[in-house]
Image: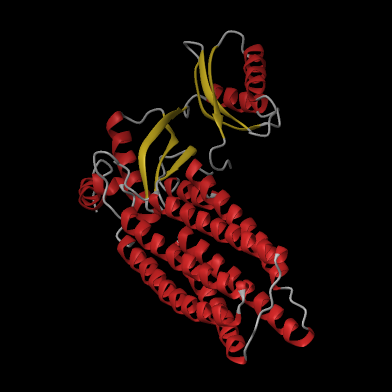
């Protein structure tokens, strides 16, 4: 396929300026949404079924632990409803107000589920404390124990299934729901253990056990919430994805290096990004334009990442003295252990102008002082040159 055909193909399926492309959701998105919704519906039906049985058992046996377990199942069903609504909203196409789409709504739905888990844990803890202060005598039957045992098995299977699907389709909402279901199975198992202990010894510990379990749920809720908030704030992109993108870009023979890969997340598996490339100084503007378009097409097709910008570094290739200067400056700059990389180097020996970027590690106590020291060291080595040095951050992964 020719370059013009490549560009035409891209414009038809993913023009970076097209609102549909900017949503960052590829052709497989509808099937992903269907999987999430189907899994959530299964969770709703299972939890409503369990909640009904547990409510009857809890009320007839005067067991606050089983009643709270039933309420917890209802909160799980509500979590699945939130997942469905969030998935539907996240699937909306980009528009003028939100040109990058609505994918981040999935993170908000995951946050709401975390809050529901927290609420369930706090409620369970409050009720358990009340029963500790005002003790009561439960009345278990064989049927109630069988139902609780069955609920444990259902929750274990449901939790593993929902979390597994969530990990497969990269849905935080499903993962959180699956983890919550697994916690529910632990709650039910503890309730069953307390019931057996009471039947064997007449010792009622379910209120104390309920309080302990509630604290575990609260802890889990905070962890889920923290994970989701971290993604909303913006986390470092997976290093393997960056390495894969760099490898793809480097397949073009004109590229001498790939740097400054920055990915902006707009929902699970939805990225817009930018990067810089080193190209020989003799390439014309037309050749660079064609090269950039080819890179954008290939990266999108192979990684589903929309490159909204590709910066250009001009690379000295024919001047041996310039190459020697580059090598020497690189040694000076990277002598500081906090300088992870030097790139984008170009020197004009006639105009006595030198420019390059350095990546300063976040581990440095004072990144600015590291940058200043590098500038001073290079200027000392080349006092006749005017320096243009930029300080970069390690946004993703440095090779």
116 shown above or below 239: below
For the C terminus, the image quarter is top right
Quarter of the image holding residue 309? top left
Q: Residue furthest top?
A: 384
> Can you see residue 78?
yes
* Depth order, front residue of 380/224: 224
At a point 33% along the width and 48% down the height, the residue shown is 102
Residue 147 x/y as whole percent:
56, 86
Q: Is residue 286 rendered to the left or right of residue 151?
A: left
Residue 224 is situated, as x and y percent measured from the top left of the image, at 56, 55
| Residue beneath the point at 48% across and 75% down | 51
Q: Eyeballing the image, is 1 above or below 191?
A: above
Q: Quadrant of residue 91?
A: bottom left
Give left or right: position of 108 versus 154.
Answer: left
| Residue at (29, 39) in percent of width and height | 290
Instruction: Name the side, left or right, on which 132 lies relative to 298.
Output: right
Above or below, 398 against 93 in this view is above
Name which quarter of the figure residue 179 lies in.
Answer: bottom right
Residue 251 in the image, given as x and y percentages of width and height: 43, 49
The total of numbered circles placed on residues is 0
Residue 357 placement, left or right of 253: right
Residue 246 lies, in percent from the top left, at 48, 46
- Eyeballing the image, is 4 above or below 155? above
The colouring scheme, among rainbow, by chain, secondary structure or one colour, is: secondary structure
Residue 268 seen anywhere in this rendered image of the structure = no
Instruction: Assign the N terminus to one quadrant of the image.
Output: bottom left
**Front residue (pair 66, 314):** 66
* Foreground residue among 369 and 168: 168
- As drawn, the residue found furthest toward the bottom would be 142
Observer-nearest of 370 and 78 = 78
């Amino acid at each position: 396929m020719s370059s013009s055909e490549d560009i035409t193909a891209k414009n038809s399926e993913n023009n970076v300026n097209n609102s549909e492309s900017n949503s960052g959701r590829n052709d497989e998105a509808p099937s992903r949404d269907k999987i999430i919704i189907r899994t959530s519906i299964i969770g709703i039906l299972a939890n409503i079924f369990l909640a009904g049985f547990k409510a009857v058992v809890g009320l007839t046996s005067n067991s606050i632990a089983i009643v709270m377990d039933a309420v917890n199942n209802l909160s799980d069903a509500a979590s699945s409803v939130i997942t469905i609504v969030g998935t539907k909203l996240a699937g909306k196409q980009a528009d003028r107000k939100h040109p990058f789409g609505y994918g981040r709504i999935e993170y908000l739905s995951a946050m709401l589920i975390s809050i529901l888990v927290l609420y369930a844990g706090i409620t369970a803890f409050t009720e358990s404390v009340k029963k500790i202060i005002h003790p009561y005598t439960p009345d278990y039957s064989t049927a109630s124990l069988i139902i609780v045992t069955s609920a444990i098995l259902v929750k274990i299977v449901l939790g593993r299934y929902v979390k597994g699907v969530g990990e497969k389709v990269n849905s935080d909402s499903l993962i959180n729901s699956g983890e919550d279901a697994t916690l529910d199975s632990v709650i039910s198992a503890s309730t069953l253990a307390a019931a057996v202990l009471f039947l064997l010894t007449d010792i009622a510990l379910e209120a104390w056990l309920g309080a302990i379990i509630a604290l575990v749920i609260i802890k889990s809720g905070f962890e889920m919430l923290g994970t989701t908030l971290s993604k909303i704030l913006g986390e470092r992109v997976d290093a393997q994805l960056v390495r894969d993108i760099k490898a793809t870009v480097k397949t073009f023979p004109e590229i001498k290096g790939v740097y400054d890969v920055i990915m902006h997340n707009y929902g699970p598996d939805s990225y817009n990004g930018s990067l810089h490339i080193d190209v020989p100084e003799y390439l014309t503007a037309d050749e660079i334009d064609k090269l950039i378009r080819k890179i954008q097409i290939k990266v999108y097709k192979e990684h589903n990442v929309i490159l909204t910008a590709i910066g250009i570094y001009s690379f000295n290739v024919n001047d041996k003295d310039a190459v020697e200067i580059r090598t020497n400056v690189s040694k000076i700059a990277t002598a500081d252990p906090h300088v992870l990389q030097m790139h984008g180097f170009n020197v004009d020996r006639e105009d006595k102008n030198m420019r390059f970027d350095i990546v300063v590690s976040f581990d440095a106590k004072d990144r600015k002082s590291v940058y200043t020291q590098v500038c001073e060291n290079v200027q000392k080595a080349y006092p006749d040159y005017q320096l243009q040095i930029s300080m970069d951050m390690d946004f993703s992964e440095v090779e």
